[in-house]
Amino acid sequence: TTQTAVAAPPASAVRDRTITVRFNGDVDGGLAWEFGPTQKAVTIKLGEVGETHYRAKNISNKTLVGTATYNVTPDTLGVYFHKIQCFCFERQVLKPGEAMDLPVTFYVDPGLADDPTTKDVTEITLSYSFFLASDQTPVNVLPK
């Protein structure tokens, strides 16, 4: 499981070791959206804040509420992956034909460099899957 953080680590915690974070996005067949990352990967230093965006578009003729699940691979690195801001923290509402950029702000914990079991890790993949929310009432969406 990935971690959540309210802020990035201090600049003094940033390490020289870099890691490539790859991005993936899928949509469940029950949700008529197009969804995916706007870039394939970023390379950042451990402890440095990274940001990426995903793009979602409602390709149906009705307003739809979606909810995203996520995972990180390799699975054992979830404890080192910290999200500061993520569209996955809230349900998303898209009107017919509407598209939206969805930001993710994150960092990889500098402690990864001290873990002997991760010394050969050079890449992490962050994957999201969007599903049709079971409650399609837009008023139940958390305020942004």
Image: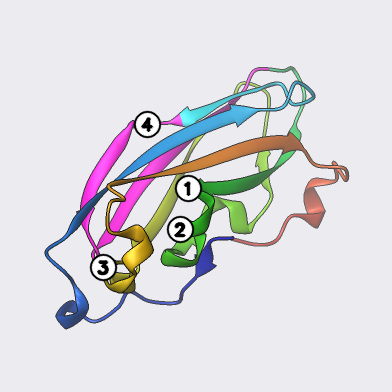
Circle 3 residue: 113
Q: Disc 4 to disc 1, how far (Cα)?
A: 22 Å
Which residue is rendered at x = 32% and y = 74% of the image?
111
Q: Point out the frontmost of discs 4 and 1.
A: 1
Within 10 angstroms of label 4, few (less than 14), some, or many (20 or more) residues?
some
Point out the stretch of residues depicted in magenta: 37-59
Residue at the farthest front position: 116
Residue type at the position of mark 2: Leu
Circle 2 residue: 77
Q: Disc 2 to disc 4, how far (Cα)?
A: 23 Å
Q: Earlier in the sequence, mark 4 or mark 1?
A: 4
Within 10 angstroms of label 3, few (less than 14), some, or many (20 or more) residues?
some
* Pick the front one: 82 or 93: 82
Q: Disc 3 to disc 4, how far (Cα)?
A: 28 Å
Which residue is rendered at x = 47% and y = 47% of the image?
74
Q: Residue 98, image x and y in percent? A: 58, 28
* Snapshot quadrant of residue 125: top left
Q: Is residue 133 left or right of residue 42?
A: right
* Pick the front one: 56 or 119: 119
Residue 115 - label: none
Circle 1 residue: 74
Residue type at the position of mark 3: Ala
Q: Earlier in the sequence, mark 1 or mark 3?
A: 1
* Residue 98 appears in view: no
Within 10 angstroms of label 1, few (less than 14), some, or many (20 or more) residues?
few
Q: Of helix, strand and loop, which one carries label 2?
A: helix
Circle 4 residue: 38
